[in-house]
Amino acid sequence: MATKIELFLRALGKPLVKFIMRLGELTIFIARSIYNCLTPPFYFKLMGRQFMDIGFYSLPVVGLTTIFAGMVIALQSYTGFARFGAESGVASVVLISVTRELAPALSGLMVAGRIGAAMAAEIGTMRVTEQIDALVTLSTNPFKYLVAPRIIAGIIVLPILVLIGDVIGIFGGYVVCVYKLGFNPANYINSTLQNLESLDIVTGVVKAAVFGFIITLMGCYNGYRSRGGAQGVGEATTNAVVSASILILVFNYIITELFFAK
Amino acid sequence: MNDTKIKITNLHKAFGKKIVLDGVNLELQKGESLVVIGGSGTGKSVLIKCIQGLLTPDEGSIKIDGQETIGADKKQQEQLHGKMGMLFQGGALFDSLSVWENVAFGLLENQKMPRKQAKDEAIKVLRQVGLGADVADLYPSELSGGMQKRVSLARAVATKPEIIFFDEPTTGLDPIMADVINDLIIDSAKRLGATALTITHDMASARKIADRIAMLYKGKIIWQGTVKELETTDNAYVKQFINGSSQGPIQVEI
Ligand SMILES: Nc1ncnc2c1ncn2[C@@H]1O[C@H](COP(=O)(O)OP(=O)(O)OP(=O)(O)O)[C@@H](O)[C@H]1O
Ligand SMILES: [Mg+2]
């Protein structure tokens, strides 16, 4: 009997110990990353490259997802509102759902797929081909050279992307309402501006900054700890995208709740 | 007079249950060229990585210029790395940077040399390893394996280090290119007056580069001596290794 319990506890213990070790490893990684983001030297040139990669080249993806999101929300909410004869509510529904929810969450998920994977693959390849060791032997701190520029760029760029996404998403709603549902353009714009509240924008921007941190952190962390050749790098990219996406959805809820309480 | 550059005492390193280094003792004199030989997977690369602080040993001491490196703080570590150069077994060139930026990396990032001057310096070092100025603007992926090794060598010596590590510099090269690399190693080490630690299975290369040879087996240095002593030794392990015979005390686990 005792041996069976012992076996059970052992089976339970191993993954648990592994999980706690991973958590500790991640905590140390985060602490080191933040410390190195805040202390000089800063590699502005590398940061600039990341601004382009994360921000500029993500514009088409973010633009496409947010415009269709805005369009579909306009259509769906019209279907709902038409029953109560309150078409004018559509503008404010589009505004709130795009700025608070759709632009940050969709941009976050799209960028996670695009950038999280690319980062994990690049840093992972550098790890398994000993380029990270080479950095260290050339007296360069890999956290400063590789991790910090990416995380800083992520935190700054994602909010900008989301602000652009807000505008495009609202424009999507406008297009559907005016050209398909026959709304008066001036009325639509008016009710959008009237309902515009800074808290909606702020919620979205705060979310975006957090998502930017999550995406770049998961990309760097999974790449940095990858082991064992091409297979290890492949695993790292998958883990980076999956963990970033899940964390984005979790923190999306947490931040919404924080702002909702106010 | 104390001319010991590197002193390794009782070094232990294990990965989980797998014991790789099991009490290594080794000393390098200033300006000396030591070659470490040993079978595949005996922990030669691990030994070098421990000296450089890329891996943390479980036990033992490594002193460079009399200064303990294990447990050294960040500042001391960076200072130590400033003294060292390394040719990695796989090259480990930065594939996002051009050839000259690779070679000049230490000059640009640490010595804060202006780019123009660093490029000139890089081209000079490239020429020393037999590469023309035309490769300077290529990317590592556009080079052949032998050229990558030479660029890697150029990067290792560009900062004029006091200690240079060469991890299997000739593996995977044709015999002529291997000999070219040997000459380059001797040449660069001599020009810089550097202390060199080379790892290799290539006995021709070892005989050519080494002042002294040490053999690593089962986590310990089981033999060391000059090249002359190598030829006349009656150590059965060494004899088997240099003759490349599958018969003898060294049993390869298949
Ligand atoms: N980071 C690591 N994690 C786990 N095991 C490792 C690690 N690095 C090396 N090892 C193990 O240590 C042993 C020695 O590896 P090492 O790379 O030093 O061999 P080597 O003597 O350089 O071999 P080769 O001549 O083939 O390069 C190997 O069995 C390897 O599996
Ligand atoms: Mg090796």
Image (cartoon, rainbow, N blue to C red):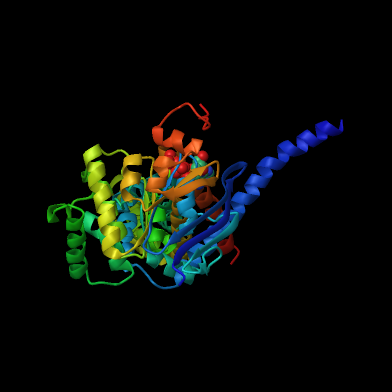
Residue most toward the right?
A1
Q: Which quadrant: the N terminus of chain A?
A: top right
Q: Who's the residue at 13% across and 53% down the image? A: B132
Q: Where B168 falls versus A171 (above or below)?
A: above
Task: Indicate the quadrant containing the C terminus of chain A: top left, top right, bottom left or bottom right.
Answer: bottom right
The spot of residue A216 in percent (x, y) is 43, 55
Number of disc labels: 0
Residue B121 in view of the camera: yes
Say left or right for B26 vs B136: right
Q: Nearer the viewer, residue A243 or B202?
A: B202
Q: Is residue A239 visible?
A: no
Of B250 and A2, the residue lying toward us: B250
Tell me: A161 left or right of A77: left
Residue drawn where x is 33% and y is 69% of the image: B110
**Quadrant of the image occupied by residue A232:** top left
* Left or right of B31 on screen, residue A39: right
Q: Say above or below: A190 vs B242.
A: below
Rendering coords of residue B126 (x, y %): 20, 57
Where does residue B91 sit, x and y in percent of width and height? 32, 48
Which of the two residues, A183 or A170, is positioned nearer the viewer here? A170
Q: Residue at x 56, y 60 (%)?
A: B61
- In percent of width and height, residue A208 lies at 44, 59
Between B163 and A138, the one lying in front of the other is B163
